[in-house]
Image (cartoon, rainbow, N blue to C red):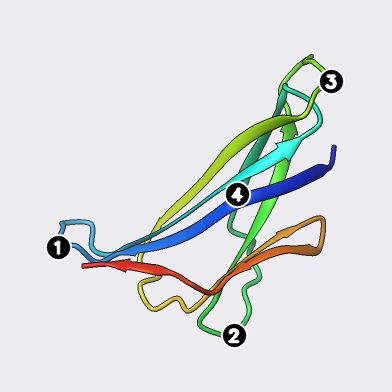
Amino acid sequence: MNVIDTKNWSARINKMPSLEGPSLTVTGTVIVGNSATQAVLVLPPVQDKSMGLRLELKLEQTGAGATALTEKSVTYSVAGYDNTTHVTIFSEGKELIRIDDIEVVY
C-alpha cells in the first residue's frame, strides 16, 4: 500500500476559550490506489527537539475494495500544542509535507 499523492493540507491552532484549552488540528487529503485503504495520522513516540510536531501517515487495508484512485480525508486533533511552529507529515520514513503556515484562531 502506497500513498499516490496528497493535497489540501492545513493546520489550525484553536485558542478559543474552552474547558479543554487550546488544541491543534491537522487535516489533509490522501490519494490511495484502493477504495478499502484507510489513511490515519498518528503521533510517533519520537519527536524532534524543535517547536514542530511530527506526524506519521499510516495506511490500513480494511477489506476488499476496488482498485481505483480514491481520495481519503485525514484529520488529527490533539489538546495543547498551542506553540507549534510547523507540522511535518512522514510516510514510510520519508517526508511528505511540511506545513509552516499554521492558522491561529482566537
Question: Measured from the top left, where is residue 88 in percent x and y?
Answer: 63, 68
Q: Where 7 sits versus 52, above or below? A: above
Question: Measured from the top left, where is residue 74 in percent x and y?
Answer: 56, 42
For mark 3, give the secondary structure. loop
For disc 3, the neighbor class at 10 Å (few under 14, some 14 to 19, many from 20) is: few
Kindly identify which residue carries mark 4. 41
Residue occupying image coordinates x 84% and y 20%: 67
Q: Where 49 sits versus 96, above or below? A: below
Q: Where 97 sits versus 84, above or below? A: above
Q: How far is disc 4 from disc 1 in space, using C-alphas?
A: 26 Å
Look at discs 1 and 2 and give the one toward the viewer.
Answer: 1
Q: Which mark is residue 49?
A: 2
For mark 2, give the secondary structure. loop
Figure quadrant of the C terminus:
bottom left
- Residues under numbered marks 4 and 1 in contact, where contact means CB atoms less than 8 Å apart: no
Kindly identify which residue carries mark 3. 67
